[in-house]
Amino acid sequence: MWKVTLISDAKQDLYKIDNSMKKQVMTGIRKVSQKPLPKSEGGYGNPLGKANGLNLTGYFKIKYKRLGIRVVYTLNRQEKEMIIIVISARADNQCYDEENKRKGKF
């Protein structure tokens, strides 16, 4: 299992969501943290790329379709650390815009 770190903005994102949703999000993060690498390397990671003018290469997503939430994370492979950048609504690429703003904060 990889170490999970939430940047301060992601902690605030998590704090803002309903407790029942929070529990489901954390369960998903724990599951993915067992194998957060890209699917091409045998993990659960859904890699992001270039879309809508944003370069999200090196970032991954966890989708919670029924909750309408996405989690965006990156990896520090040397430290075996999964760094959560954004926990946000998936509507209109909101989570990706937030991730792009937060890139330099960790």
Image (cartoon, rainbow, N blue to C red):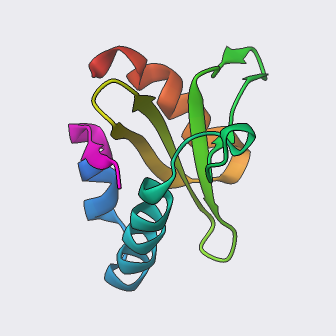
- Placement of the N terminus among the 4 image quadrants: bottom left
- Placement of the C terminus among the 4 image quadrants: top left
Residue 81 in which image quadrant: top left
Horizontal and vertical percent for residue 66?
A: 67, 77
Nearest to the observer: residue 31 or residue 106: 31
Segment tinted magenta in the rendering? 1-10
Residue 102 in which image quadrant: top left
Horizontal and vertical percent for residue 21?
A: 43, 78
Nearest to the observer: residue 75 or residue 49: 75
The residue under the point 44% across, 69% down is 25
Asked whether, in this view, residue 92 is left or right of residue 99, the answer is right
Residue 51 in which image quadrant: top right
Above or below residue 51? Residue 25 is below
Q: Residue furthest front?
A: 42
The residue under the point 43% across, 61% down is 29
Q: Residue furthest left?
A: 8
The residue under the point 59% across, 74% down is 67
Asked whether, in this view, residue 84 is left or right of residue 97, the answer is left
The residue under the point 59% across, 38% down is 60
Asked whether, in this view, residue 19 is left or right of residue 51, the answer is left
Nearest to the observer: residue 102 or residue 60: 60
Above or below residue 13? Residue 99 is above
Horizontal and vertical percent for residue 11?
A: 25, 50
Q: Is residue 2 magenta?
A: yes
Above or below residue 25? Residue 47 is above
Query: How many labels, in total?
Result: 0
Q: Is residue 66 magenta?
A: no
Horizontal and vertical percent for residue 3?
A: 27, 47
